[in-house]
Image (spheres, helix red, strand yellow):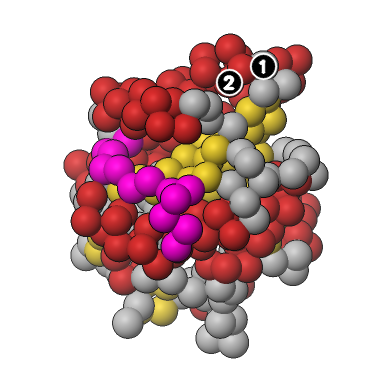
Amino acid sequence: MEIAGKVAVVTGASMGIGEAVAKIFVEQGASVVLLSRDAGRAESARSRVGHAERTLALSCDVRHREEIDRVISLTLHHFGRIDIWVNNAGHGLIDSVARMDLSACRDMFETNLFGAIAGMQAIIPVMKQQNAGTIINISSVAGHIPLPYSAGYSGTKFALNAMGKAAGVELKNRNINVLTVCPGYVRTDFSANAVRGGEVKKVRPSTVRGITAERVARATLAGYRRQKREVIVPWTMHPVIKLYQLFPGLVEKAMVRLAKPAE
């Protein structure tokens, strides 16, 4: 499926993966609305993306359904339709299950999971009326393999994977595809911006540098064009996920050895 001429809305588009997805979509001929809780940061990202005639920057806190509805209304007024909705807004929480602050965990679920569900519930009627559309949920490999000391974040992504894939089945006969994108380690400011609790550790081999946000964006574009149900990037994460499914004890032993205080 070609993307030129399509209209896409990207939440959490002021930096990292969201901005990279917005940029590659625009470069391929789409019109894109960049959303962020901070209108100024959204506008700065729009300036970096370029193609001002085909972009729009709006403030939107996905925790509030009325703000999502406002964005949809403004986008339809400005561009006439919405072909692609990208749920990317989210943040992390680094702490152990025993010590993590429950209010911080609930707030993360409100953004990462319930914000994405609200986005889907808001855009599905529009796409049903158009009889076409694609919803893209930016999830994580942490939605396949529980990540110690980021268990709350993993929980949001496990749930997002389930919601997106179930919605994909429900919407299959309405010509609406739901794509779940699961990146591994990505070199962004995600960890720096994560909420940090009292027991901050990381479980990551020192040799793993991570992939770029641009690589995730390219994989997302390819998944959209092929109308896939899931994309895992990089490809080397496929055997890791399969290994965990078949031999979880082996992977968990490795995680115990790797766990060390985060910088």
* Coordinates of residue 51 in the picture (x, y in percent): 47, 58
Answer with the quarter of the image where residue 211 lies.
bottom right
Q: Which residues are magenta?
A: 50-62
**Which of these two is toward me, 38 or 147?**
38
Furthest toward the bottom, the residue is 207
Residue 127's mark? 2
Residue 16 seen anywhere in this rendered image of the structure: yes
Left or right: 110 with respect to 186? left
- In the rendered structure, which amino acid carries the disc numbered 2? Met
**Quarter the C terminus occupies:** bottom left
Q: Using the image, determine if residue 102 lies above or below residue 28.
A: above
According to the picture, the residue beneath numbered tag 1 turns out to be 131
Q: Using the image, determine if residue 47 lies above or below residue 58.
A: below
**Which of these two is toward me, 257 or 200?**
200
Furthest toward the front, the residue is 53
Left or right: 79 with respect to 247? left
93 is within the stretch colored magenta: no
Within-10-Å neighbours for mark 2: few <14, some 14–19, many 20+: many
Q: Name the residue located 61 percent from the left edge and 17 percent from the top edge.
A: 130
* Coordinates of residue 65 in the picture (x, y in percent): 30, 25
52 is within the stretch colored magenta: yes
Left or right: 122 with respect to 135? left
Label pair 1/2, CB-CB below 8 angstroms: yes
- In the rendered structure, which amino acid carries the disc numbered 1? Asn
Q: Name the residue located 48 percent from the left edge and 48 percent from the top edge.
A: 54
Residue 202's mark? none
